[in-house]
Amino acid sequence: MTAKSAAAAARATVYGFPRQGPDRELKKAVEGYWKGRVTADALRETAADLRRSTWRRLADAGVHEVPTGDFSYYDHVLDTSVMVGAVPRRHRGAVAADALDGYFAMARGTQDVAPLEMTKWFDTNYHYLVPELGPDTVFTADSGKQVTELKEALALGHTARPVLVGPVTYLLLAKPAPGVAPDFEPLTLLDRLLPVYAQVLADLRAAGAEWVQLDEPALVQDRTRAELNAAGRAYRDLGALSDRPRLLVASYFDRLGDALPVLAKAPVDGLALDFTGSAAANLDALAAVGGLPGKRLVAGVVDGRNVWINDLEKSLSTLGTLLGLADRVDVAASCSLMHVPVDAAAERDIDPQILRWLAFAQQKTGEIVTLARGLARGTGAVAAELAANRADLASRANSPITRDPAVRARAAAVTDADGRRSQPYAGRTAAQRAHLGLPPLPTTTIGSFPQTTELRTARADLRAGRIDTAAYERRIENEIRDVLAFQEKAGIDVLVHGEPERNDMVQYFAEQLTGYLATQHGWVQSYGTRYVRPPVLAGDISRPHPMTVRWTAYAGSLTDRPVKGMLTGPVTMLAWSFVRDDQPLGDTARQVALALRDEVNDLEAEGTSVIQVDEPALRETLPLRTADRPAYLDWATEAFRLTTSGVRPDTQIHTHMCYAEFGDIVQAIDDLDADVISLEAARSHMQVARELAAHGYPREAGPGVYDIHSPRVPSTEEAAALLRKGLEAIPAERLWVNPDCGLKTRGWPETRASLENLVAAARVVRAELP
């Protein structure tokens, strides 16, 4: 096919769309099912309605080929485990008794059975459930979900393409099951898994699939020659199948590097590649391997992870270059649109000028359709869209909203000394212990306590004018008093005020900093039924007034025990926002750090002697390619130190991280120079404690003993057993006792019971110390 005919064949497609619905209908239905208010049939019907409305939305916008299989009740990797029969032994009884309840048991656990481990999906803020595999794993095909959803779309008249997690990525994301040797490599199961994928592909072909997409984002990471050979073997074998649909292998989030020639020569029918950000290097790499003669290329030229409008002319130029490199070029976003909100048109409180700069999933779909039409018919066919796009881009570039000279001058004046404590850890730890007077194995929580219906109602009442500020603040004061009273009665050593005034750990601060925009409907899935509204970082950052001092000081006035001040760190403020793309991230991080530094210093001045600056996103934002990591870690750790280094030696600085793989950033954790770090450890059975010990981490640490993302209440003995495991790696004088994460999503009955058991476990193990 010539470049001209390839252009004429250009079509618009997407890899996935937000699952929750415009008003988070899926969240409400699933949580209603868990509480017994929604029947299984009603839940299934809600899910089917959401799928139908999404396909209709895409088709009405002009998308030629809609995805199926991207919908999930909880997590698409968990769906893949079900598809290949990789159900952990402890969950098989529940799955056999009721498939839907068993599915949710794997996701959330029960009182008697622990859930699957959860961690971050590459460098996003989405969490997936980690497959557990071992030498005795037997895979079996279960194509029911995929076939059902494909048939639904076809019956409605859509051209549909099922989307599956690819076999290589699935195995590379997996971990050894409990009881399996930790050095077991799930990728050794590839030859056992491929026949199951072959069966699923055959089932989809029989159901009417012309194309099936197999997602292999793990191949954009650094991979060994053995792993690349495994990928080549996988697609050689799948490509050789006689009874299969055409195969589209997709990658996203970064450049493919050495994996690109492996996939380019594989006997598959097309590749879907990311051409945004650092993945733009895929263009030259594709040319270097001779392109994809005789194959389809789906070009991800619209950023699927951020909310800024596309530069349509630049994307059309990229697409024009790609025309000579494939038999057919189609247009898509860089990845699934599940990482952005549904529709910017729903936002009524954002300045109309700024709203012109934003593109959520619906607007990105429109951009994709425009680019496909422009590629197929020429720029004249989209002249009006290009003119409007140029005007919107210029509006943003020239807006005073984006630049504050005073902020930029302050950031430019920062010196190395501003990012160093006045004493090294060895000197200040003695001052902190003398000042705080804590027992061995001190207990604390991570910060938030349950966000009750009453609290959410109070915030809604304040926004709607049903109560005034004074009445709202009385409700917050009452909640803080109750939270402190419970902690004191339970015997917790370092208290928190519970954060009742906070809607979200990032949004709360963003709403009080200049340069940020808050949305009303910009919900994005974080995990399961947990959705967040990431704020939009549009301009330079400063702090007009204290943000947390009032409530922290109030809590401190109610108790003689230490109360932690609670802040969200600069890297997490960036990672859990939609960041500006018009300046380096490190520059933005420094601005946020200086604003937070003012808050830290004000907390200390008001008498707060323990201050926690959370950085759960430090690991998730780590670049996928090793070569890109040193530069990132340099500015990320500098930003944290800049936030925290202005305090006295006897002020104890904590940080917190959760649900990520920490082993490869232990040096960076050390470089933060925090006095205490708390980390997720319950589901991974204290793995992080062993990693800290192997590194020789010299500071205090609290690996979690209570998994807060499950409704289970851990027993005293269970928490004590984990604590003893922690002591095998971290000496008692440096070990803290705490949950994995904040308690915002939990209910009060389970929170009370779990924390009481946690304190009891600490007392039991304290009594065992020499």
Image: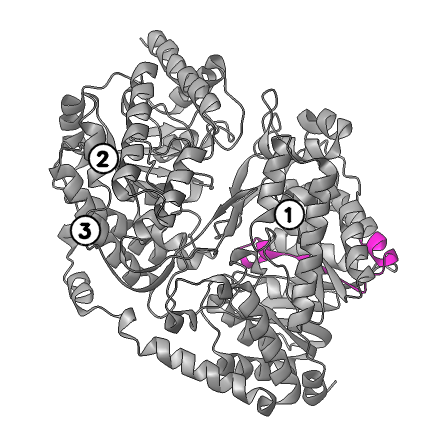
Mark 3 surroundings: few (<14), some (14-19) or many (≥20) residues within 10 A:
few
Quadrant where the C terminus is found in the figure: top left
Is 553 in the magenta? no
Quadrant where the N terminus is found in the figure: bottom right
Give the residue at mark 2.
552
Give the residue at mark 3.
545
First in sequence: mark 3 vs mark 1? 1
Query: For the residue labelled by badge 2, is the local secondary structure a helix, a strand or a loop?
Result: helix
Q: Answer with the quarter of the image where residue 144 lies.
A: top right
Comparing labels 3 and 1, the label whose residue is closer to the camera: 3
| Measured Cα–Cα span from mark 2 to mark 3 | 15 Å
Q: What's the residue type where badge 1 is placed? A: His
**735 above or below 656?**
above
Give the x, y percent position of residue 53. 68, 59
Read off the magenta span: 201-224
Mark 1 surroundings: few (<14), some (14-19) or many (≥20) residues within 10 A:
some
Of 107 and 745, nearer the camera is 745
Of 21 and 245, nearer the camera is 21
Query: For the residue labelled by badge 1, is the local secondary structure a helix, a strand or a loop?
Result: helix
Is 212 in the magenta? yes
Give the residue at mark 1.
76
**Image side of residue 157 versus residue 352, left or right:** right
Give the x, y percent position of residue 47. 69, 48
| Measured Cα–Cα span from mark 1 to mark 2 | 40 Å
Of all residues shown, which one is farthest toward the bottom?
Answer: 380
Q: What's the residue type where badge 2 is placed? A: Thr
Q: Answer with the quarter of the image where residue 240 lies.
A: bottom right
